[in-house]
Image: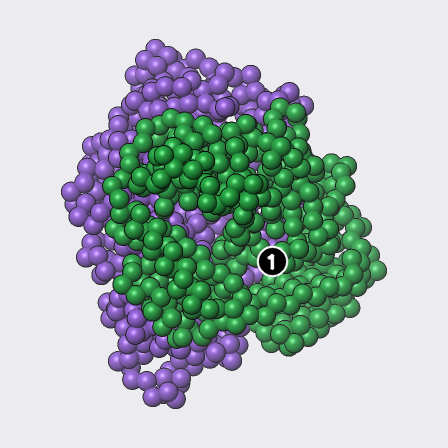
Chain colours: A purple, B green
Amino acid sequence: MKLEKILDIGQKIALRKGLSPQDFKFSARIVQENTWVRSVRNEAIDENSYDSDSGLHIEVWYKGHFAHSGTANLSENGAQKAFETALSLAEAAHNLPLTKFEFEKVRPSSKGHYSSTIKRPLNEISSKEVFDQLLAASNFLKVSPQIQSRTAYSMTIKTDFDQISSEGARFSHDFSIVNTDFNVVACEGTETQTRSDKGGLARCAQIGAEAFSLTDLNLRCQKIGEEAIELLKAPECPTGNFDLILAPDQMILQIHESIGHPLELDRILGDERNYAGWSFVQPSDFGKLQYGSSMMNVTFDPTPIHELASYGFDDYGNPATKEFLIKDGQLLRGLGSLESQQRLGIPGVANARSASWNRAPIDRMANINLEPGASTLEQMIGSIAKGALFYSNKSWSIDDYRDKFQFGCEMGLWIENGQVKHKIKNPNYRGQTLSFWRNLKAVGDRNQVEFLGSPYCGKGEPNQVIRVGHSSPYCLFKDISIFGGGR
Amino acid sequence: MIELKNNFNRICDLLFSRLTSDLRLNINLTGEDSLFIRFNNSKVRQCTDVSHYKLSCTLQNTNRRINFSFNLQSDLAADSIMALREFEVAHANLLLSPEDPFLVQWTNNGTSESIYKGQLLPADNLISQCQSAFENLDMAGLYCGGQIHRANRNSLGQSHWFSTENFFLDYSLYNGASASKGIYAGKDWNSDALKTQVLGRKRDLDLLNRPKVKLKPGRYKAYLAPAAVAEIFSTLTWGGFSAGAFKKGRSGLQKLATDQGDLSPKVTIRENFAMGLSPVFNEQGEVSSEQIPLIESGKLKQWLTHSRSAKEFNLTSNFAAESESPRSLELLPGTLKSEDILKKLDQGLYLNNLHYINWSDQITGRLTGMTRYACFWVENGEIVGPIEDMRFDETAFHILGSGLDELTESQEFDTATGTYYHRSLGGKLLPGLLVNDFSLTL
């Protein structure tokens, strides 16, 4: 069904129920998402799945209050029922609203189209081509009999997102996404170590089938396997406070958990208190709080063409632009949509995003990036008398105010007197958000920046997963508490 | 419901009629009609109604398989066209797939039907009852309610149906930064029961008004209430009881099978479908025993084993779900009476809730997470005041093994409140734990 038809249905319902344009407005969104998941484990097929997910989201505004209805029924009857359900919810709730909104102030009448930049459409690659790549990868991972489990995984996603409103908005998105993961489990006696290609599912991007032209697949997979074998013999990560370099594939987790989530304005407003949590950041902190050292520059950037969460408009129709959240270490701006900005009176970004047609938009991260500095990796390592370099996120835990965290990585390198000495296993570190970022002493240069992300950021009631992108160079932190595994 | 069942059966029959003799088809229905009302400051932040019915199918021949899934529109003609189109795409791709050495050939596992009806309120009535129950309180949370359906058929004649109508109100009460947590859940809404529960949580809030106790990292005697134990099991069940995860070197309870670690003889854990909270059939329609002993008196009895793992690793299937996670887990109770908890704790931590648990070292079963909500410092068997949130880092083998002092004689049900992609079913039945030397680190 065309969105213009849905516009017509909404307007007819308004007429039939005698609702004036001052009391009743709406928007509608049709989502069509096709996902292929293919994976191979130990050179045998593990998963071969195709999902077609389509549905309609109706958002009704009635006397200042929004309500939502999601249905997979894309017929006229389905749309009509969704309108009536959303309207009845808005009528039920408008006597007890948390906040009333003016429709035009929080739902701009934007027009436009965003499309992922690709070279080859995803539907041009066959299952056989993908499985051939994955089987090859599985073989490359098999560097030793000690590699007990080796997995090669790919997820390709094609999403079309079309939106219209009664007040003139008409915008659409056409995303093409590829997510790959190659990982091994190495075992010897009672020792077990895992290693992957940039951490679980972190290698994800807006890209076409050209993502499967993996010229370096052989080297990457062999390296993953060899590093896992080396970790079996490596000493445990030492315990103590040391200088610590985090590689980009751990920095993305550090940025996500200790910058992204605490800056979400809906958390600061308390919407998330019962589930994901609140935030240590106070509304009065914006424009004042020294979040980290002067080397810290963090942006909300929906513009890099291949980064996972680039887009043209958020679900409210707010045009998405690059904004500094933190500049020279000072907190400037929150991750809040037009609704949250109105509620708090704090500058935000275009980040009202829903997981799909069956969820209402909430404040989400998009691409949250740490801007590059000037240090080379050699300079950072050379400056360390005693310390470590950690790669690839494995575990994450942080409190509901986003302060006390503990993160685990797959692999560490031990550094003494400015030289890498050897690998260390089970590297973990813990700290508190502000003191950690204030200990940022060096930021890697542009050449080190890696664009990674996660397809699975969870938040919201009802729960929603969203895709987020993060980019970062290597970063050096002083005086960090690190430790290993075991009891 | 009757129309839904009829349409499901007709679409299944239509697809089965297209199978050639070498093909088999397994079809699962996941469906819900759900009302979500999100509250903040005891007022409505967002309301969403969702109607979502999805068919997830597996098509296989003698040596290959493919999964395909699509949404139903609740319109038989449109759904039939969609089903045939998706079937054709799957069939074409099946032949392009590599051979599957661990393919499980299905059987007919019979027929079953379980239907549980509830008494739920419409949105307007529900909002006014919540307004009344939380009057003058700062509440944040989510109401979620409506019908949930699960069904399975295969082309060999198997047919299972499970429907339930239930709700939960998952909420927190706040006094500034202090909060107490409640979950009111069931099949029949009762406003008096909600008000009684809210009064109890309000009493917790009063205790939270006392001055906060700042603790240093170290080892403390601790009482973990059932909700805190549920958080630990949420992480532990993430591969912990899985045969496949064990064989791949990724089970947090790995040490149980390699004789490197034991749990306390007081610990007995089982799948218990007698609770009636989730379907006893899995995605292939295989029907589990009503009870599956997993750990008995601290010793591993069996892993949860899906038929595919059984084939790959030469094990016996106990018809676990594909995830090999428990669907209806029960930790059997002990002997500690509720009224004796504080006295036995004497001095230490009373932890009502834990938060955001993940592995510090999965292979040794070491977990880290945070205290959250109503957690107290106890001295001389009496609550002194709330603690500042602390990070813990402790192994499951200590919490459920060498450090375990006692389990409570009463258990509490932890309702599955997950709503990622669709509403979850099931839950866990757990007692509280009294643990010695529980490690706080930050």
- Check the image and report above or below for A412 versus A217: above
Query: What residue is drawn where x is 72% and y is 48%?
Result: B319
Element under label 1?
Answer: loop
Residue linked to disc 1: B277
> Which quarter of the rendering shows the N terminus of chain B?
bottom right
- Check the image and report above or below for B210 versus A145: below
Query: What residue is drawn where x is 54% and y is 66%?
Result: B187
Quarter of image, res A169: bottom left
Query: What residue is drawn where x is 43% and y is 31%?
Result: B221
Coordinates of residue B338 in the picture (x, y in percent): 48, 45
Coordinates of residue B106 in the picture (x, y in percent): 78, 53
- Check the image and report above or below for B258 versus B145: above
What is the chain identity of the residue bearing mark 1? B
Residue found at the far top of this picture: A417
Quarter of image, res A360: bottom left
Left or right relative to A120: residue B21: right
Q: Is residue B250 visible?
A: no
Coordinates of residue A208 in the picture (x, y in percent): 50, 49
Q: Residues within 10 Å of mark 1 (few under 14, many from 20)?
A: some
Query: What residue is drawn where x is 51% and y is 29%?
Result: B403
Residue found at the far right of this picture: B21
The kind of residue tagged 1 is Leu
Choose between A10 and A313: the one closer to the eye.
A10
> Which quarter of the rendering shows the C terminus of chain B?
top left
Q: How many marks?
A: 1
Coordinates of residue B129 in the picture (x, y in percent): 38, 71
Choose between A446 and B6: the one closer to the eye.
B6
Quarter of image, res B99: top right
